[in-house]
């Protein structure tokens, strides 16, 4: 049983359960032993309805693929006073309080770290929901340092992100679904600007994923920062100067970290079609789990030592 099923529990805890029976059972992952610290997905945004829906979908995918993995999502500080809470207030004013659509405010990363400490639970592992460098990381590192928590690297650059962007481009009719399908697409882009947020550092990191994407698409790919004035427009002009007649934009963002206004402004300013953000694509869930599992072995000895000390203190008290 997991504390995820216990009302009021601050964070889920991995506890051993009965093994499923049958030849087609799905075994629990052996990499996550009992008492392991929780995976705390750090979302760099306030809990708006759109962001909540995306994160909830990701969490659902991760849990379905990793039964028993202790997992929770924390939002940007102040996210608990979110649009979800405002909607609940509005519903109450309209006489619909208690309706199924009303959502509770979502906890911030700071809230969940404090609750874990108060409950005597292992310090969670923080996995930022980011594809690369971002201003949010500095604040997250500072918060983690105060709590004694580990922050993993962002999810990119990575070949799985290049795959996700490729899929979003194909869904928008801007690229072939794969290179094996050689039929022509009249609207296919002959050059791609990989857009991201986080300034020039993020754009430089996105360039690595851009190389992988270019290999998949067989067209030139350049990276640009949505939050740097003129960066995306300059990248589009560069592609056109090198012969691209149908450049397109491809957001290398999960979603919550990039305001919708930035994405729309880039499309309007350049006149280029754009694919959708990566969103809750399956490979994003894989990357989140992999980031957690990569740092877990180094943390387990300390967790086991704390558990032994707690057991000794309990015996002494008896």
Image (cartoon, rainbow, N blue to C red):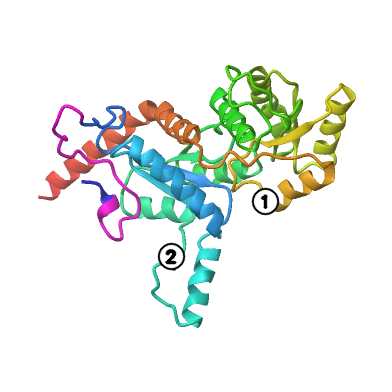
Magenta highlight range: 4-24
- On the rendered structure, is 190 left or right of 238? left
Q: Dot 1, how many residues are within 10 Å of its Cα: few (below 14), some (14-19), or many (20+)?
A: few
Q: Is residue 22 magenta?
A: yes
Q: Is residue 16 magenta?
A: yes
* Secondary structure category for the residue under label 2: loop
Whole-percent x and y of residue 187? Answer: 73, 32
Front-lying residue, 218 or 130: 218
Viewer can see residue 221: yes
Residue 266, how many percent across, how many down?
78, 44
The residue at the point 69 percent across, 28 percent down is: 185
Our reading of the magenta stretch's main secondary structure is loop
Residue 259: assigned label: 1
Q: Is residue 157 left or right of residue 104?
A: right
Q: Residue at x 58, y 22 (%)?
A: 178
Residue located 57% across and 17% down the image: 180
Disc 2 from disc 1: Cα separation: 23 Å
């Amino acid at each position: 049983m997991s504390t995820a099923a216990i009302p009021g529990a601050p964070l889920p805890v991995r506890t051993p359960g009965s093994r499923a029976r049958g030849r087609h059972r799905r075994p629990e992952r052996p990499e996550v032993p009992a008492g392991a610290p929780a995976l705390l997905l750090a979302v760099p945004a306030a809990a708006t309805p759109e962001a909540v829906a995306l994160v909830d979908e990701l969490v659902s995918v991760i849990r379905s693929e990793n039964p028993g993995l202790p997992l929770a999502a924390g939002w940007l500080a102040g996210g608990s006073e979110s649009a979800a809470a405002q909607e609940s207030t509005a519903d109450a004013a309209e006489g619909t309080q208690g309706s199924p659509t009303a959502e509770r405010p979502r906890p911030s990363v700071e809230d969940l770290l404090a609750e874990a400490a108060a409950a005597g639970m292992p310090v969670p592992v923080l996995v930022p929901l980011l594809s690369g460098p971002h201003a949010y990381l500095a604040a997250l590192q500072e918060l983690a340092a105060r709590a004694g928590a580990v922050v993993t690297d962002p999810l990119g650059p990575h070949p799985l992100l290049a795959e996700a962007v490729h899929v979003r481009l194909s869904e928008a009719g801007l690229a072939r679904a794969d290179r094996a399908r050689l039929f022509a697409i009249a609207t296919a882009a002959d050059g791609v600007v990989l857009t991201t947020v986080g300034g020039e550092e993020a754009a430089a990191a996105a360039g690595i994923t851009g190389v992988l994407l270019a290999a998949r698409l067989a067209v030139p790919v350049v990276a640009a920062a949505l939050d740097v004035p003129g960066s995306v427009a300059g990248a589009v002009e560069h592609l056109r100067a090198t012969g691209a007649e149908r450049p397109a934009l491809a957001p290398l963002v999960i979603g919550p970290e990039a305001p919708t206004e930035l994405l729309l402004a880039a499309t309007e300013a350049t006149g280029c079609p754009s694919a959708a953000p990566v969103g809750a694509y399956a490979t994003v869930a894989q990357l989140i789990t992999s980031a957690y599992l990569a740092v877990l072995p180094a943390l387990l000895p300390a967790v086991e030592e704390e558990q032994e000390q707690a057991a000794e203190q309990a015996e002494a008290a008896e």
